[in-house]
Image (cartoon, grey):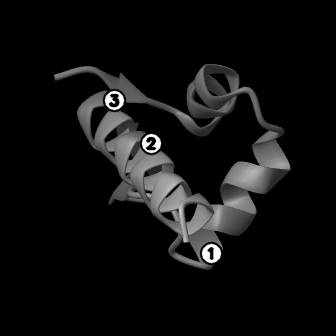
Amino acid sequence: MERFTVQQASQYLGIHRDTIYTMVRQKEIPHFRLRRRIMFSKEAIDSWIREQESESVQVSSL
């Protein structure tokens, strides 16, 4: 299982690191903590992206 740090997740998603922190605080993105460190599972992020795309398509087709 591949895991990302905040910096790696921001690069993978193409968004600013501060945006990642905001999304974590608001529980908008799947993450977990190893002690104080915020981590992301690549599989969980990929699944979350597919869900976001699916929701976007459903809203657009209404």
* CA gap, disc 2 and disc 1: 18 Å
Q: Dots 2 and 3: beta carbons under 8 Å? A: no
Q: In terms of secondary structure, where does tag 1 sit?
A: helix
Name the residue rendered at 64%, 64% in the picture.
23
Image coordinates for residue 31, horizontal then vertical, percent: 39, 55
Residue 29 in the figure: left or right of residue 48: right
* N-terminal label among 1 and 3: 1
Image coordinates for residue 2, horizontal then vertical, percent: 27, 20
In this rendered view, identify the residue nearer to me: 12 or 40. Answer: 12
- Please rate how many residues cluster around mark 1, counting C-alpha atoms within 10 Å: few if below 14, some from 14 to 19, many from 20: few
Residue type of the residue flagged with mark 2: Ile
Residue type of the residue flagged with mark 3: Lys
Task: Tell me the residue that label 3 is attached to.
Answer: 42
* CA gap, disc 2 and disc 3: 10 Å
- Res 35 visible: yes
On the rendered image, what quadrant is the N terminus found in? Answer: top left
Residue 22 in the figure: left or right of residue 6: right
Task: Tell me the residue that label 1 is attached to.
Answer: 25
- Please rate how many residues cluster around mark 2, counting C-alpha atoms within 10 Å: few if below 14, some from 14 to 19, many from 20: some
Task: Tell me the residue that label 2 is attached to.
Answer: 49
Q: Which is more foreground, mark 2 or mark 1?
A: 2
- Res 34 visible: no
* CA gap, disc 1 and disc 3: 19 Å
Residue 2 in the figure: left or right of residue 46: left
Q: Is residue 27 above or below residue 6?
A: below
What's the mark number on residue 54? none
Q: In terms of secondary structure, where does tag 2 sit?
A: helix
Residue type of the residue flagged with mark 1: Arg
Image coordinates for residue 4, horizontal then vertical, percent: 44, 29
Name the residue rendered at 44%, 42% in the picture.
49
* N-terminal label among 2 and 3: 3
